[in-house]
């Protein structure tokens, strides 16, 4: 899995993902700290990475383009019943 971690997560989640064999990048590594949410989102999309964030602005009022699921709150659930909000995928 390829993941991009937003600046509000710190380095521990990145190290955890890397230890488990995933390709994880942090916005600090790319000198994107302080970048706007749309800029971080575009970077994740361009690299086809899962964006992992604690920023609710990525979830509230978004529609998943693949499933057409509308996320209205940070604690919405996907079709399988798993909560979404801390991770939002491409």
Image (spheres, helix red, strand yellow):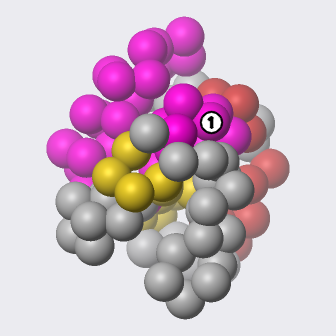
Whether 31 is drawn above or below 90: the answer is: above
Q: Residue furthest right?
A: 12
Whether 43 is drawn above or below 75: the answer is: above
The reply, left or right, for residue 48 in relation to residue 83 is left
The reply, left or right, for residue 10 in relation to residue 1 is right
Tell me if I can see residue 70 in this picture. Answer: yes
Does the magenta-highlighted stretch encompass residue 40?
Answer: yes
Image spot of residue 38 (x, y percent): 34, 24
Residue at position x 62%, y 84% from top? 81
Tell me if I can see residue 6 in this picture. Answer: no
Image spot of residue 52 (x, y percent): 56, 50
Mark 1 nearby-residue class (10 Å; few <14, some 14–19, many ≥20): some
Image spot of residue 78 (x, y percent): 52, 75
Image spot of residue 14 (x, y percent): 66, 53
Residue at position x 25%, y 46% from top? 45
Does the magenta-highlighted stretch encompass residue 80?
Answer: no
Disc 1 designates what residue? Answer: 56
Whether 60 is drawn above or below 90: the answer is: above
The reply, left or right, for residue 3 in relation to residue 80 is left
Residue at position x 36%, y 65% from top? 69
Q: Which residues are magenta?
A: 31-60
Q: Residue furthest top?
A: 34
Secondary structure under the numbered disc 1 in the rendered image: helix
Residue at position x 69%, y 56% from top? 75
Quadrant the C terminus occupies: bottom left
Quadrant the N terminus occupies: bottom left
Is 84 or 40 nearer to us in this picture? 84
Q: Residue furthest bottom?
A: 80
Is 63 or 13 nearer to us in this picture? 63
Q: How many marks?
A: 1
Is 41 or 64 nearer to us in this picture? 64
């Amino acid at each position: 899995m390829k993941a991009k971690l937003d600046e509000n997560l710190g380095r521990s989640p990145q190290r955890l993902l890397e230890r488990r064999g995933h390709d994880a990048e942090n916005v600090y590594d790319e000198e994107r700290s302080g970048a706007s949410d749309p800029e971080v989102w575009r970077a994740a999309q361009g690299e086809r990475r899962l964006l992992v964030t604690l920023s609710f602005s990525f979830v509230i009022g978004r529609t998943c383009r693949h499933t057409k699921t509308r996320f209205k709150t940070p604690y919405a659930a996907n079709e399988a019943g798993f909560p979404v909000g801390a991770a939002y995928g491409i």
